[in-house]
């Protein structure tokens, strides 16, 4: 059973860690975004090379490489959106009372560039692996694309949990295009259709005549579909699903602490204006992620003038 258990565990780890890593990076201060995107672009180039190099490798190792490269290529597209580099021409909230096709059109404008980038990425991935025996990376990308489109449509139509807390501050206007309700008519269709697809993929992977490469690759794909279905259920169930990635949100909390509430910034200015004291106490406290007023009281005495 190792040929099935190891791919499941690997897919779970990649799904959990990559999601948290993206949340962590898009929660950091905006000046860091260009460096995060630069690092992601280096990984994108390496992933495209790995996808092409492994496309003729129909082995278990080739399945792992193809799956990993498909995930990393998709991660670049997700980061380009969440960091604000590829969103859409509309960068403000939808006006109150907007509904129907006008509301849908505004939503498309808000994500248009990102959707076009996904189309271009899909064409690139399909072209790079066309006619090759190892299509695991391509199918990984296409499953992520299809299930993410389904999740977006369900959030637009209305679900219980929108996870607004995961939207970085510069994308908070996107929440105006989402609706909060118990469920919508598309949701059962999305879950049912994806469940059928997942079962068919799993059956193919478990077939006795399947080669080890196909068993591993199809297990990756079936696990990915199952995780996407789980994410769909997270949208409607009264569960704190985002707690799975609390570790990724810590960078946002640290940034907010350093950026400071008004009273924290005021405390720094107050120290700066007091004769014989230095703002280094506030800077040191901010650097260490401590509460500025408390740290100032503890350390300001060190910086008194003689």
Image (tube, rainbow, N blue to C red):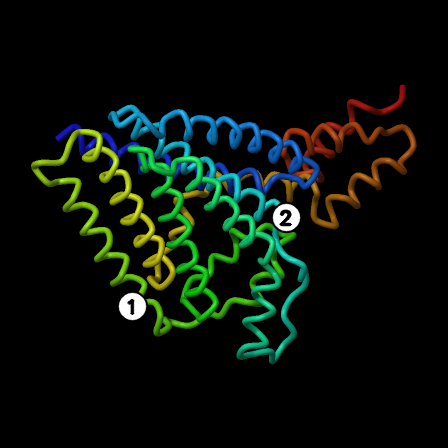
Q: Is the residue marked by circle 2 packed among few (<14), some (14-19), or many (20+) residues within 10 Å?
A: some
On the picture, is 264 further left or further right than 277? left
Which residue occupies the foreground of this view, 226 or 25? Answer: 226
Contact flag, marks 1 and 2 (Cβ < 8 Å): no
> Where residue 269 sits in the image (x, y, percent)?
84, 41
Q: Earlier in the sequence, mark 1 or mark 2?
A: 2
On the picture, is 140 further left or further right than 24? left
On the picture, is 136 further left or further right than 202? right
> Where residue 20 sits in the image (x, y, percent)?
46, 40
SS class of the residue under badge 1? Answer: helix
Which residue occupies the foreground of this view, 20 or 90? Answer: 90
Q: Please determine whether, in this image, residue 203 is positioned above or below residue 51.
A: below
The residue sitting at 38% across, 60% down in the picture is 235
The residue sitting at 39% across, 44% down in the picture is 244
Disc 1 target residue: 188
SS class of the residue under badge 2? Answer: loop
Disc 2 target residue: 84
**Residue found at the very far left of the displayed protein:** 208
> Where residue 144 sits in the image (x, y, percent)?
39, 48
> Where residue 17 sits in the image (x, y, percent)?
41, 36
Q: Which mark is residue 99?
A: none
Real-space Cα separation, disc 1 to disc 2, in angstroms: 32 Å
């Amino acid at each position: 059973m190792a040929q099935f258990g190891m791919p499941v565990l690997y897919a779970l780890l990649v799904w959990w860690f990559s999601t948290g890593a993206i949340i962590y990076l898009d929660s950091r201060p905006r000046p860091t975004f260009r460096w995060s995107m630069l690092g992601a672009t280096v990984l994108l180039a390496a992933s495209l090379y790995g996808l092409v190099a492994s496309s003729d490798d129909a082995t278990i190792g080739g399945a792992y490489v193809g799956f990993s490269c498909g995930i990393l290529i998709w991660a670049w597209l997700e980061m380009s959106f969440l960091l604000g580099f590829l969103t859409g021409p509309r960068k403000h909230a939808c006006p109150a009372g907007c509904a129907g096709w006008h509301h849908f059109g505004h939503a498309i404008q808000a994500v248009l560039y990102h959707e076009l980038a996904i189309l271009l990425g899909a064409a690139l991935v399909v072209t790079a692996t066309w006619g090759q025996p190892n299509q695991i990376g391509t199918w990984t990308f296409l499953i992520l694309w299809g299930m993410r489109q389904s999740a977006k449509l369900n959030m637009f139509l209305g679900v219980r949990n929108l996870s607004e807390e995961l939207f970085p501050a510069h994308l908070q206007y996107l929440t105006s295009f989402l609706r909060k309700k118990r469920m919508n008519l598309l949701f059962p269709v999305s879950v049912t259709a994806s469940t059928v697809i997942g079962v068919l993929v799993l059956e193919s992977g478990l077939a006795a005549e399947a080669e080890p490469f196909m068993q591993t690759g199809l297990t990756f794909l079936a696990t990915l579909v199952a995780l996407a279905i789980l994410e769909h259920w997270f949208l409607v169930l009264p569960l704190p699903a985002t707690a799975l990635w609390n570790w990724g949100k810590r960078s946002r909390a640290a940034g907010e602490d350093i950026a400071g509430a008004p009273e924290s910034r005021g405390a720094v200015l107050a120290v700066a204006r007091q004769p014989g004291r230095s703002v280094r106490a506030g800077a040191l406290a901010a650097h260490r992620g401590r509460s500025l007023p408390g740290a100032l009281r503890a350390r300001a005495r060190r910086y008194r003038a003689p």
